[in-house]
Image: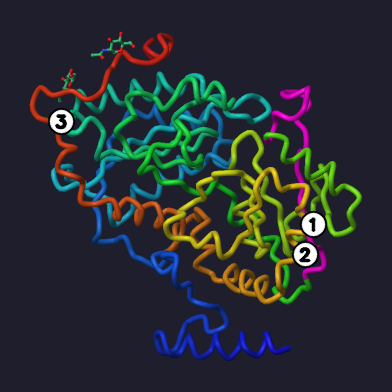
Amino acid sequence: MGVWIWVLVFGFVWGIGAHGLDRHPHTERISGSAGDVLEDDPVGRLKVFVYELPSKYNKKILQKDPRCLNHMFAAEIFMHRFLLSSPVRTLNPEEADWFYTPIYTTCDLTPNGLPLPFKSPRMMRSAIQLISSNWPYWNRTEGADHFFVVPHDFGACFHYQEEKAIERGILPLLQRATLVQTFGQRNHVCLNEGSITIPPYAPPQKMQAHLIPQETPRSIFVYFRGLFYDVNNDPEGGYYARGARAAVWENFKDNPLFDISTEHPTTYYEDMQRAIFCLCPLGWAPWSPRLVEAVIFGCIPVIIADDIVLPFADAIPWEEIGVFVAEEDVPNLDTILTSIPPEVILRKQRLLANPSMKQAMLFPQPAQSGDAFHQILNGLARKLPHNKNVYLKPGENALNWTAGPVGDLKPW
Ligand SMILES: *[C@@H]1O[C@H](CO)[C@@H](O)[C@H](O)[C@H]1NC(C)=O
Ligand SMILES: *[C@@H]1O[C@H](CO)[C@@H](O)[C@H](O)[C@H]1NC(C)=O
């Protein structure tokens, strides 16, 4: 009772004091942890030039497989569409702060809908060759004022198996560019310093259609649906999710506080809205759409992925809204979660209820202020002005065009 009164009074007073009549007096403005920057407007803070590429690099690929619009890597397509009509776009490359190359490298799907990145390096090389010979801007910096959206599992390492991805490393030609990617893990060869980590694409309308009344009680303590083992790709067990998902299952399958299963029910989205905690363990990669779903559905994300770099981590106070559990502590998950004080849970839920937090996780059509598109632009704007030393002297080279696996050098 005391907690509730404190919350109401504090929230109310804060709302008035900070900026007169708050538009959302029932929610809390996110202060600290740079949360306020979520509401920044990128317009006027940067200008982006969109290269015009032959449609075989983008539109034709999508025509061949429209499923690319709905899978979790669709950000590469929607970002292109967004930029074409964005007020930050400039048609004059001379005044551009950033250069964007519209190329859909993850839209090559198996019959089952899994994206194969095997052609991506050649395709990317081909596009860079084209822009560097047709415009003078690439050669000026060899990519340091260019950004690329690379939403595949391990970003520009272009492989879905971590070992292979690490072996490949970031495509040599992209070493100086800013990579906008879903993959994020500290001290990992597939994440360059200065990259922008974004949420994976999750369909906004579909999630919207499953919203239930906000006052619905959260009667599930811990919720998770997904694989615990990947028997096909990891028959021995232990390698998939570095064993963390297996540990969840083995320790808690019979625990009544844990509603966990591999069965994906039709009420999946509704169930997340009835849960207090939603597990977001790593799979093959540290990230998954569950992160986005948890935020949208106000379920406190329990992040089990050591060293993960979360989407827009410089703008979203993940430490405050989520719970972080080390992979090795999974066997203590029940104790860890049951010992979080109710007022801490309430505070996390209130932060999650903040519309700006949800907005930042989504790529809506059409775009809306504060959404993930705008957060990407904000991230790019915060990196300006470019350091003077990114501009190469005439004749100076920083990249090696023949580095990397020989197979990547074949024309696309
Ligand atoms: C940029 O450099 C490449 C290789 O160094 C060269 O082939 C190309 O013509 C240059 N582009 C322009 C527009 O001068
Ligand atoms: C570029 O990479 C190739 C292949 O790894 C290597 O043989 C060559 O020496 C490199 N060139 C320079 C200038 O470092």
Mark 2–mark 3 CB contact (< 8 Å): no
Mark 1–mark 2 CB contact (< 8 Å): yes
Front-lying residue, 374 or 59: 374
Residue on which the image places disc 1: 334
Residue on which the image places disc 2: 338
Mark nearest the camera among 2 and 3 is 2
Type of amino acid at the residue the image marks with label 1: Asp
Residue on which the image places disc 3: 136
> Does the magenta run of residues contain 351?
no
**Which label sits on residue 243?**
none
Would you say the beta carbon of the disc 1 residue lies within 8 angstroms of ligand 2? no
Picture quarter with the C terminus = top left
Q: Residues within 10 Å of mark 1 (few under 14, many from 20)?
A: some
Q: How many angstroms separate mark 2 from mark 3 (CA)?
A: 59 Å
Would you say the beta carbon of the disc 3 residue lies within 8 angstroms of ligand 1? yes
Residue 130 image point, x, y percent: 27, 23
Mark nearest the camera among 1 and 3 is 1
Sequence-wise, the earlier of marks 2 and 3 is: 3
Q: How many angstroms separate mark 1 from mark 3 (CA)?
A: 58 Å
Sequence-wise, the earlier of marks 1 and 3 is: 3
335 to the left or right of 117 = right
Find the magenta span and give its range: 218-241
Residue 174 image point, x, y percent: 34, 29
- Name the secondary structure under disc 1: helix
